[in-house]
Image (cartoon, rainbow, N blue to C red):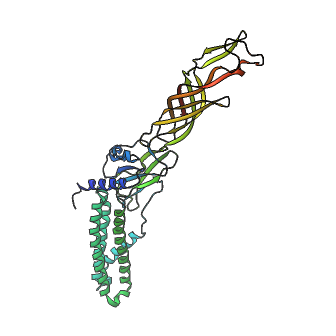
Amino acid sequence: MRPCSRVPLLVVLITVARAASAMAQDAYVFYDHRPGAANLDARLSYIRSGAESAQRQIGRPPRLTIPPGSQLCVQVLNRNAVLYAYSLTATKVAADTIPGLAALIKQLTDALQHRQAIAGHEPYLYAVANLFAGLQAMQAYQLASDTVVDFTLAAEEMAHRSRSATTLDSLATVALKALGPDTTLPEVILLRAVHVDLSKRVKKIGGSFRQALGTVHDPICTPVAASRLRVTVKIARTSVDTTAPPQRPVGDTVIAVDVDPRDDRTFLLEPGTLLSAFTQDKSTISLKNGVITQAPDHSPAFHAGVFALARPTSIRWLWATVGVATSDNAVSDVFIGITLRGGASLVGGRIALGAGLAMSRVPVGVSQGAVGGALPADVKNVDEIVQRGFRMGLGVNLAVQVP
């Protein structure tokens, strides 16, 4: 067999090329299923979602954020899809079996032990026996392929053994035709049944390796929706053999990756609270001893509001923000500024904190009478003549999202 020192590099290059050519928003997790006892972190690497994060990183992936509609793909490197089934679900994928192998082997053994019963038919008998030996060689290597790191090499070796067994099958067919009328004898019919079953088994094993080779570099993917997911990969032994111990990790949860839907919005509306402070000309208008008074008011004000946020696609945490706040069923503040908004996921908690210019509607004087004078006779309450206007000040907006 050829040395396999260059093959892992080839597998990696092919895999990375597939990932690069796929949707830029998909995330990839790579799991090296080579034989041996390496720990999980040594077997794992990953590429985060998004072209800006296409650097492959070694080790166990953290929770990944992926846009809804994109996929998490798990690429199993150095897989052996003949002896192992790989899936993202709890459903075991197992190869079917053809029952009755033990009975047919016994029939062949009985025929070999009673050669005198089929005297004159030995060429066909030995041709079937040689085919049986060829099948045994294929079955032995099928299990031995568990120790081969690169399945491509295992498939090449099995193809060689399959061609040899197919040649033996053809020779047995030639020997059968040479019997002529004797093909209707009961003992020949028995051998022919064994021959047909052995031929089917040779084709099945060879075909399983060819089929597995065609999918050896294909990832298994699952779409990401608008909720948090835990994606698990199950690796199970197929029913090819249930007695030989596996040489690679198996289990219902060989890999577990947490995935959040990534927040790729560049514009959004969200509620929050606006604090306005240091507002120019803000005053307190009151009536003391029948005289209208006006005093500077430096107290901050808190009002509920709605904020429109927009950001460039390249910066996730910095948002240009415009908002309005209300008080007493009227617009009390207009805000324009910058907001720092944490969290890259559509789910989970986050805090948004911003600062900027606030134009607040505050008391600035009186509409009737004069400060220092008496309350006009037709006015019952000083609040009725308080004059309000928009004045500039500092604004701080705060929004908290609870998961």
Q: In the current view of this chain or complex, which residue is farthest to the top?
A: 289
Residue occupying the point 27% across, 82% down: 123
User: Where on the picture, by quarter, is residue 218?
Assistant: bottom left
Quadrant in which the N terminus appears: bottom left
Q: Total marks drawn? A: 0
Q: Relative to 274, does residue 182 appear above or below in the rendering?
A: below
Q: Is residue 294 visible?
A: yes
Residue at the (48%, 41%) spot, across then down: 345
Q: Residue furthest front?
A: 369
Residue that appears at 35% across and 72% down? 203
The residue nearer to you, when weighing 10 against 96, is 10
Give the residue furthest to the right: 378
Tell me if residue 392 comes above or below residue 236 in the rendering.
above
Q: Residue 246: tell me if it is visible.
A: no
Q: Quadrant of the C terminus?
A: top right
* Residue placed most toward the observer, 212 or 189: 212
